[in-house]
Amino acid sequence: MSNTATSTETSAYVGTVADLYAAFGRGDVLYMLDRMSDDISWEEGLRVTDLPWFQRRQGKQQVAEFFPAVAEGVTLSTFEPQMLTGDGATVVAVLRIAGSLNSTGKRVEEDLWVHLWTFDEDGKVASFRHIGDLAREEMAFKP
């Protein structure tokens, strides 16, 4: 699979994703939203779930709703990107995540959670998707 981004551009995209994770860690949502395209596609292709933070969203305004949904739903004790790699305008991140669901107090832990980031020709995030075991979080979400 090849696209037109150069290796320098790919490195920049990987660096941008690293910066986005740092911003997430410090709660800087405005920084994150500023690096997203106005019509960003969020969770495109994700199956339907009752988890409020894993919902399909379109555009920055809807994506902005993701961050309070996560904060209200999950207390993260671990959020560690383990690997970032890119191919053209696509960046794949492998993360280790742990925490507890605020509504039930049940713990969730994922050693292999994947994020898929795609950038547009302006260098903005055009799409984002979580890839992992939603069923594990869904079971913890149930009282």
Image (tube, rainbow, N blue to C red):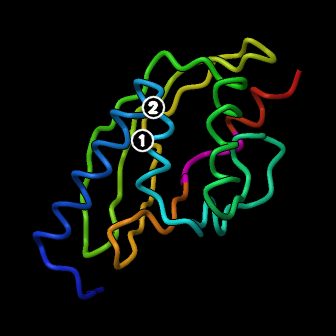
Q: Is residue 56 above or below residue 111?
A: below
Task: From the viewer's side, name the closer residue of 130 and 137.
Answer: 130
Task: From the viewer's side, name the closer residue of 125 and 142.
Answer: 125
Report the residue at 77% width, 40% height from top: 51
Report, in whole angstroms, how far the alpha carbon at label 1 lies from the one at label 2. 6 Å
**Residue 89 percent coordinates (x, y):** 31, 73
Q: Amino acid at mark 2?
A: Asp
Q: Are marks 1 and 2 in contact (CB under 8 Å)?
A: yes
The residue singled out by tag 1 in the image is 31
Give the quarter of the figure containing the C terminus. top right
Residue positioned most to the left: 8
**Residue 97 percent coordinates (x, y):** 47, 30
Q: Is residue 22 magenta?
A: no
Q: Is residue 132 magenta?
A: yes
Residue positioned most to the top: 105
Report the residue at 34% width, 79% height from top: 121
Q: Is residue 6 above or below residue 112?
A: below
| Mark 1 crowd level (few <14, some 14–19, many ≥20, 10 Å Cα) | few
Secondary structure under tag 1 reads helix
Q: Amino acid at mark 1?
A: Tyr
The residue singled out by tag 2 in the image is 28
**Residue 131 percent coordinates (x, y):** 54, 54
Give the quarter of the figure containing the N terminus. bottom left
Report the residue at 39% width, 39% height from top: 95
Q: Which residues are magenta?
A: 130-135
